[in-house]
Image: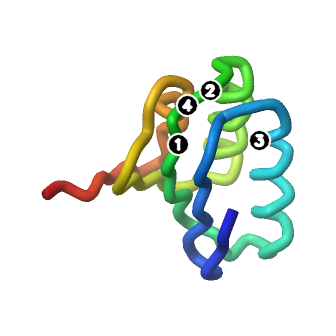
């Protein structure tokens, strides 16, 4: 995960520990994250649901430019956007 103080990038699988890692990354930036940028082939549905709860709790927007498959699609933010080509 990478953070530019407004965007947090989640790249990789929605696997065990991803929700906890997301929560820790958000808290490490003290409320400055507004958008979660997704790039994921998906993964575990249960972990995706836990990540979705984190997104909802923090009222994050979500955006993707590359890939958001399987469990990643559960991460619907307050506002959602996609890069179209």
Q: CA distance from mark 2 to mark 1?
A: 8 Å
Q: Cβ–Cβ below 8 Å for labels 2 and 3?
A: yes
Q: What residue sits right under mark 4 in the picture?
A: 42
CB-based contact (under 8 Å), mark 4 and mark 3: no
Q: Residue furthest left?
A: 85
Q: CA distance from mark 2 to mark 3?
A: 10 Å
Identify the mark at residue 18; answer none if there is no mark.
Answer: 3
Q: Residue at x 86, y 58 (%)?
A: 24
Relative to the observer, which residue lies in front, 56 or 43?
Answer: 43
Task: Kindly check if marks 2 and 1 are in contact, taking CB atoms under 8 A apart as contact.
Answer: yes
**From the viewer's perspective, is 27 left or right of 76?**
right
Element type at mark 3: helix
Q: Quadrant of residue 56?
A: top right
Q: Residues within 10 Å of mark 2 (few under 14, many from 20)?
A: some
Q: Give above or below for 51 relative to 4.
A: above
The kind of secondary structure element at disc 2 is loop
The residue to which callout 1 is attached is 40
Quarter of the C terminus within the rendering: bottom left
For numbered disc 1, what is the local secondary structure?
strand
Mark 1 Cα shell of 10 Å, populated few (<14), some (14-19), many (≥20)? many
Q: Could you tell me if the residues under marks 4 and 1 are in contact, i.e. CB atoms within 8 Å? A: yes
* Residue at image point 61% right, 54% down: 10
Query: Which comes before the other along the chain, label 3 or label 1?
Result: 3
Q: CA distance from mark 4 to mark 3?
A: 11 Å
Q: Quickly name the residue at label 2.
A: 43
26 to 21, vertically: above or below = below
């Amino acid at each position: 995960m990478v953070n530019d103080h407004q965007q947090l990038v989640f790249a990789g699988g929605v696997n065990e520990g991803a929700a906890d890692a997301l929560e820790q990354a958000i808290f490490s930036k003290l409320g400055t994250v507004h958008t979660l940028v997704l790039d994921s082939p998906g993964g575990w549905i249960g972990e995706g649901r836990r990540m979705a709860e984190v997104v909802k709790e923090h009222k994050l927007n979500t955006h993707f430019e590359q890939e958001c498959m399987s469990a990643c699609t559960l991460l619907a933010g307050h506002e959602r956007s996609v890069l179209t080509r």
